[in-house]
Image (cartoon, helix red, strand yellow):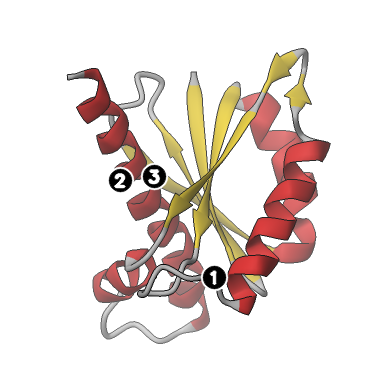
Amino acid sequence: MRILALDLGDRWVGSAIADPLGITCRPYQTVELDQLRDFLKKILSAEGVSKVVVGYPKTFSGTESDQTKKIVSLKLELEQEFAVVQGQDVEWILWDERLSSKRASAVQSGKHDEQSKRQSHSIAAAFLLQTYLDHLAMMRS
């Protein structure tokens, strides 16, 4: 069971993937939003992904912003399109992403070039995914 995380943005989408045991993860790849569907077609089957965790950008007060609504809408579209891949059900989950981008920026501090900005999206996805994996581990305890 592989788990993929997506940090959906207006221009870039960061991704991270968990190890096969679902204990740790690593940043995977950042793609342009218009390349997302092609990227998902490849990675979902190639990596045997059974669950996709999508960053849910709630406001700090816990409400939904316009960005939150855009992300939820896109997640629903992707969930319908990629509900089954190579005969395997793919579960789609929204997961609170508050502070993941800020943490990724801290890791990239001092780097302001285009490559670092792109990479920060996948780092944010890794922070997001690790919090989800930690939650699963706590639930098993």
From the top left corner, tell me how far across and down residue 74 is, in percent.
73, 57
Q: Is residue 51 above or below residue 100?
A: above
Q: Classify mark 2: residues with Cα within 10 Å, few (<14), some (14-19) or many (20+).
A: some
From the top left corner, tell me how far across and down residue 36 is, in percent.
73, 54
Q: Is residue 7 above or below residue 38?
A: below
Q: Amino acid at mark 3?
A: Leu
Q: Amino acid at mark 2?
A: Thr
Q: Are marks 2 and 3 in contact (CB under 8 Å)?
A: yes
Q: Secondary structure at mark 3?
A: helix
Q: Which residue is mark 1?
A: 64
Indicate left or right for 31 with 35 as reference: left
The residue shown at (52%, 38%) is: 4
Q: CA distance from mark 2 to mark 1?
A: 21 Å
Indicate left or right for 128 with 122 as reference: left
From the top left corner, tell me how far across and down residue 118 is, in percent.
52, 70
Q: Along the line of sight, which residue is nearer the eye, 64 or 106? A: 64
Q: Amino acid at mark 1?
A: Glu
Q: Which residue is mark 3?
A: 129
Q: Earlier in the sequence, mark 2 or mark 1?
A: 1
Q: In the rendered image, which quarter is residue 41 located in?
A: top right
Q: Is residue 40 above or below residue 99?
A: above
Q: Which residue is mark 2?
A: 131
Question: In the image, which is nearer the foreground, mark 2 or mark 1?
Answer: 1
Q: CA distance from mark 3 to mark 1?
A: 21 Å
Q: Classify mark 3: residues with Cα within 10 Å, few (<14), some (14-19) or many (20+).
A: many
The residue shown at (76%, 34%) is: 82
Q: Secondary structure at mark 1?
A: loop
